[in-house]
Amino acid sequence: MLRCYELQTTLEAVARFCDERRVGDVGSLGFRRSSELARLLPCLEPLVYDGILIPGKTRFLDMGCADGRVNVFLSWLVRRSVGVEMDDWILDDHAELKRELEAELSRRGLPPIPGNIRLFEGDSTDDALHDKIESDTGLRFEDFDLFYTYLTMQEEFAALIARKARSGAVFAVYGLERIQPRLPGFDLLTPVRALNGILALYRKE
Ligand SMILES: C[S@@+](CC[C@H](N)C(=O)[O-])C[C@H]1O[C@@H](n2cnc3c(N)ncnc32)[C@H](O)[C@@H]1O
């Protein structure tokens, strides 16, 4: 439970809203499966406690953000919430999700979505896209503190983070429980079981 009551209530509302609209659990869209935000919510307090998520400071990057729901979810906590999505038609869903969520938050008298979210179309591993992110946000790849993926290309993303991110940056992989692969160049911070049985954490050496 996060200490601020309004923040906790807001994030619960966001999780409920987004989780009712999860994509990919059934049918042909498995590759763009959505994180279940209600499962991520209990991970936030330990992340804050361990200094991995520093409210108002952390710069977050979702590599493969789809409709940007994890970016929205974390936007109340982080300084910048950046996402990259390869498919433009998937990224297009962000505007509608955001609009409908804004309406729901307003109806419930909860704070609006912060203006610190920036989503980009492209390949997360593309250096030219990193240059574009830097020119649009002022953030170089090595400025990000917390990287995220939902079991998407985690070995390739890990290699990229190992090569380009700052030492101490954390890579969070959603969708793992007890079997968590070791990633070269990283310390596994959750060796027994992923946080809340879902989020494996790796710190770059
Ligand atoms: C499983 S979904 C996860 C979406 C979101 N992060 C979440 O947790 O709800 C993975 C997304 O990553 C995208 N993707 C896969 N490889 C990518 C890459 N190299 N760069 C950017 N996006 C990628 C896919 O198109 C898909 O929408």
Image (cartoon, grey):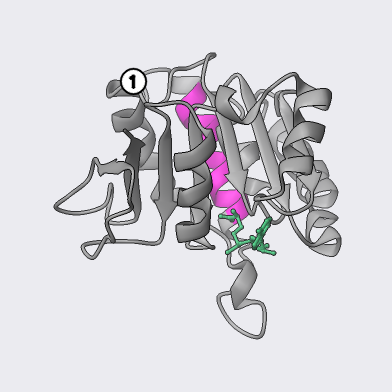
Tell me the SS state at disc 1: loop
User: Is 96 on the left or on the right of 84, as rendered?
Assistant: right
User: Is 12 on the left or on the right of 18, as rendered?
Assistant: left
Q: Nearer the viewer, residue 163 or 68?
A: 163
Q: Nearer the viewer, residue 12 or 162?
A: 162
Task: For residue 1, say whether it is visible.
Answer: no
Give residue 203's position: percent from left, percent from top.
33, 36
Task: For residue 33, say whether it is visible.
Answer: yes
Please state the quadrant of the image where ligand 1 appears.
Answer: bottom right
Secondary structure mostly seen in the magenta stretch: helix
Q: Residue furthest front?
A: 163
Residue at image x 52%, y 14%? Answer: 57
Q: Nearer the viewer, residue 93 or 133?
A: 133
Residue 59, picture quadrant = top right
Q: Residue furthest left?
A: 192
Q: Which residue is mark 1?
A: 51
Give residue 164's position: percent from left, percent from top.
54, 35
The reply to whether the magenta stretch includes residue 10 is yes
Give residue 187's position: percent from left, percent from top.
25, 41
- Residue 132, compared with residue 50, is above or below; it is below
Which residues lie in the magenta part?
7-18
- Residue 100, compared with residue 31, is above or below; it is above
- Split into 4 quadrants, where in the image is the C terminus? top left
Residue at image x 82%, y 24%? Answer: 135
Give residue 93's position: percent from left, percent from top.
81, 56
Mark 1 near ligand 1 (CB under 8 Å)?
no
